[in-house]
Image (tube, rainbow, N blue to C red):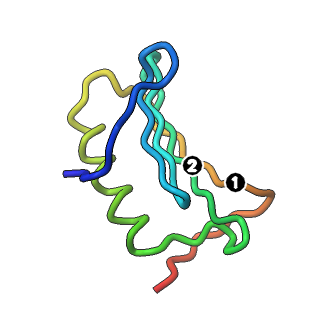
Amino acid sequence: MCSHSVSSFKFEDTMESSQEITFVLENNGVGSIILNRPRALNALTLDMIRRMMAILELWENDDKVKMIIVKGEGDRASAVVEM
């Protein structure tokens, strides 16, 4: 399970955040995963992958989640894992 705190967001949305990755679940069932490492082209670290897997497992079992969007900050993105 995800050991990070989840706090209330506007209009009962939930948001979980760190400096590198943010998770938002809106009332309309849209979940967002926002990568925030633009200097590294949003490459995923092992910690980011662990956190993503934990939230995806939670969302997979939540009937309110209808769609998940993954996006990156900055004007570039990559499909890189930084080891």
Quadrant housing residue 74 = bottom right
What amino acid type is highlighted by mark number 1?
Glu
Residue 51 on image: x %, y %: 35, 58
Q: Which residue is mark 2?
A: 34
User: Where 54 falls versus 16 (above or below)?
Assistant: below
Q: Nearer the viewer, residue 81 or 10?
A: 10
Which image quarter: residue 13?
top left
Measured in 3D between alpha carbons, the distance from the residue under mark 1 to the one under mark 2, in whole angstroms, is: 7 Å
Q: Is residue 69 left or right of residue 48?
A: right
User: Horizontally, is 32 left or right of 63 in the view?
Assistant: right
The amino acid type of the residue labelled 2 equals Ile
Secondary structure beneath label 2: strand
Q: Residue at x 26, y 24 (%)?
A: 63
Q: Say what secondary structure mark 1 lies in.
A: loop
Q: Residues within 10 Å of mark 2 (few under 14, many from 20)?
A: some
Residue at the bottom extreme?
83
Image point 42% across, 22% down: which residue?
A: 29
Q: Residue furthest right?
A: 75
- Check residue 11 in the rendering and tell me which mark sits there, or answer none: none
- Determine whether label 1 and label 2 are within 8 Å by CB: yes
Q: Nearer the viewer, residue 82 or 69?
A: 82
Q: Position of residue 54 (x, y in %)?
A: 28, 53
- Disc assigned to residue 73: 1
- Residue that protrudes farthest toward the top in the picture: 11
Q: In the rendering, at what x and y percent does residue 25 appear?
A: 43, 30
The answer to whether 74 is drawn above or below residue 82 in the figure is above
- Count every numbered label the image shows and give the total: 2
Indicate the position of residue 75 as horizontal and vertical percent values.
80, 57
First in sequence: mark 1 vs mark 2: 2
Instruction: Give the residue at x 54% y 61%.
Output: 20
